[in-house]
Structure formats: C-alpha cells, structure tokens
Amino acid sequence: MKILVTGGAGFIGSHTVVELHQAGFQPVILDNLYNSNRSVLNGIKQITGVDFPFYEYDCNDLEKLRELFDKEQFDGVIHFAAYKAVGESVQKPLAYYENNLVSLLNLLNVMQEYKVPNFVFSSSCTVYGQPESLPVTEDTPRLPATSPYGNTKAIAEDIIRDHVHAAPSVKAIALRYFNPIGAHESGLIGELPNGVPSNLVPYITQTAAGLRDSLTVFGDDYDTADGTCVRDFIHVVDLAKAHVKALSLLEQTEASNYYDVFNVGTGEGYTVLNLINTFETVNNLKLNYNIGPRRAGDVEKIYAQADKVNTIMNWKAEKTLAESLRDAWNWQLKITQTK
Ligand code: UD1
C-alpha cells in the first residue's frame, strides 16, 4: 500500500512516515518545507534505512498534485500539511482559510480523479472548544471555534463528511488530536518549531537548553487542581501509530460512504505545572519559569475519552508523560549540540 503523506517532513508527519514503514506501508512524502526542514528527511532515513520518495510540492498547487498522482499510484492519503499557529491565524485569517482549505479541496478532487479510496485527516480537539463536561467523547458537541485555525479544522471535517456522502468511492477518518509532545526515542526526529515556539513543550525544552530566558506559565487561577490549565498530552509516536491503525481500518472497511471521527488522546489530563514538575524530575534539572497572566483564547481543561479509538481501532496510548518529556529533552539536546 502506497501512502501519500502530506506534511511528511513535519512533526507528526515525520513520525508517521516511520511508523507506516514499520507497519509495511510505502510512504511517499510531500512537503513544501514552509514550516519544516529538509534535515528531517535525513533523520527518517537514519531511523528506517530507507530514502523515501520526497516531493517538495505544495498541496495548493493542483497541477503539481495531478503530476504526482499521475506518477505514483496511491492507495491512500494522510493529510497533515496545514498552518497550525493559533495566534497567527487570528492575525492572518485569510491565509489560514486559503491554505488549509484549498489544499484539502485539491486533495479530495485529485483523489476522486485518480480513484484513491482512503483518506486520513489531521483534526484537533480544538473543535470541542471548552466542553461542558469531561472527558470529551466524539459525541460531545463541537462548539464555535475560538480561532480561524480551529475553524479550519471544523470546516475541513464538514467538507470531508459531505464529500464522502456524495462520493461512495472515498472512505475517510478524521483524527482529533489532543496535545502531541515528545520525539522519536532515537533522538533523530522531533519537533522543529519555526522561530519562537507557541506550544508548551518546545518552549520548555528551549528554556532548559538556555535558548530562552524563562518560561511563562499562562495563568494559575483556573478552576483546576493547581490553578493551571489541564491538557491531554500524547506522545507523538503513539499518535503516529494511530494513523497506521486508521489506514488499516479504512482498508478493511468495505462499506462505502464511510466517514468517522476519533479522539486520539491518552484519556488522562495533566496540568501545566504537573508537566513542568515531571519534566524537571525525569530529566533531573530545574526549569526557570514564572507565572504570568492567562493567554487569551486558552481552554481551561480538556482531555479525551479514548474508548472509541481503543475499541474500534485497537489503539491505546502506550507511552507515559515522563517518557514523552524524556524524549523531548533528548531531542532538544541533540539539535542544540548540532547547531
Ligand atoms: C491548542 C489546541 C490544539 C492545537 C494547538 C495548535 C486546544 C485545547 N488545543 O493547543 O488543538 O492543535 O493549539 O498549536 O484548543 N502554555 C504556557 N506557556 C507557554 C505555552 C503554553 O503556560 O509558553 C500553556 C497554555 O496556556 C496551555 C498549555 O500550556 O494551557 C498548552 O499550550 P499549547 O502547547 O500552546 O497547546 P494548546 O493551546 O493546548
């Protein structure tokens, strides 16, 4: 099974390429390198021993996609390529809608033209907003998005659902990720944020490595155990494995018009301070951090109920928070040393 991985040089994409290979799939990487680095391809090659086909294309370029689908006969597509910075999306909504939605429409169109049946989409728990009750299940109502980024995920889910209903040859799954962290245990691939990271764990590892002065914890007056926000932090390798399971499920599903959504989280919520303390303990260091005001738009607490993905896909998160934070630090040390 040959699988196109858009955004395959990115954080989740690169780990998924490795897991696809290990499960016997043949990944083909497409990435415009806008928010990723060519060196990641080398890391993937070192881990797997394989130099996977790589196309420096943009999914917004329909003609390039057609060229690619002409050349390679795909059995499925995993679509990661997207803009993902919540704050930036508020500043540049049109760029986010255009990039994240035109690329999706192009892919669905080309898949239909070339009769490619299986589609896995990167969605996000952001579609739930601040849910009224926890943990969130897939039936928890989606709330109006609090950012253009979040809205692109909700709209994309709707586009895919409507398309699958109209196009019996296509089967699709949207995976609603919780908070992906960590890195490959080899330390050869991991997260490579562009500029100042907005996500918690890269900010922590860069601070611990001395690349930033200190971390600001955004608010300690939330209604949680220690006042800081609660998230469901999932190891990126576990998340990558969920994509392999999703593809396998699509492959085995004969029903046409199949579309479903799955939460991909550990099912456990940890506070930001829990995470910082675990990071310090597992890596035996002290982090310079201070408590600051709340960040606009942050959800107070969210974590998954992962029963559906456990039961239907036979997938469960295996790695602990401590393992994730050890791997994230190991990766940061490697990239800091090689700079
Ligand atoms: C959000 C979305 C997620 C989306 C991601 C994209 C929700 C619940 N989650 O993640 O779906 O994919 O954006 O980037 O909407 N924090 C600090 N200091 C920092 C950075 C973060 O205290 O310097 C805190 C935040 O306030 C938050 C937690 O750490 O409570 C996690 O933040 P972050 O890593 O940015 O992810 P989310 O905002 O949860």
Image (cartoon, rainbow, N blue to C red):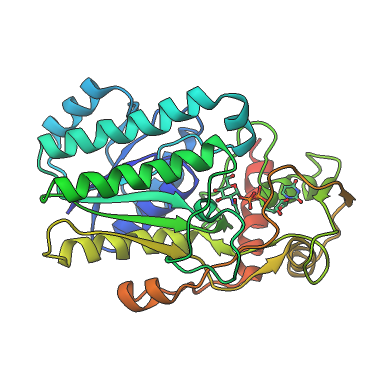
Above or below 27: residue 253: below
* Residue 224 appears left or right of 163: right
- Residue located 63% across and 39% down the image: 338
Which quadrant holds the C terminus?
top right
Q: Residue at image x 34%, y 46%?
A: 158
Image coordinates of residue 211 in percent, x first then y, are 78, 39
Could you tell whether 31 is left or right of 216 in the image?
A: left
Q: Position of residue 182 (x, y in %)?
A: 58, 58
Q: Residue at x 67, y 47 (%)?
A: 202
Residue nearest the observer in this picture, 284 or 57:
57
Decide which of 330, 155 is in the foreground and name it. 155
Establish if 33 lies above or below 173: above
Residue 225 in the image: state x and y as whole percent. Answer: 80, 72
The image shows residue 36 at horizontal and vertical percentages of 49, 34
Across the whole image, how many numbered discs are drawn on residues? 0
Nearest the camera: 314 or 281?
Answer: 314
Q: Is residue 203 above or below residue 96?
A: below
On screen, residue 162 versus residue 297, left or right, reads left
Q: Is residue 76 left or right of residue 292?
A: left
Splitting the image into 4 quarters, where does residue 63 fall? top left
Quarter of the figure with the N terminus: bottom left
Which residue: 16% across, 44% down? 74
Q: Could you say which quadrant of the image residue 258 lies in?
A: bottom left
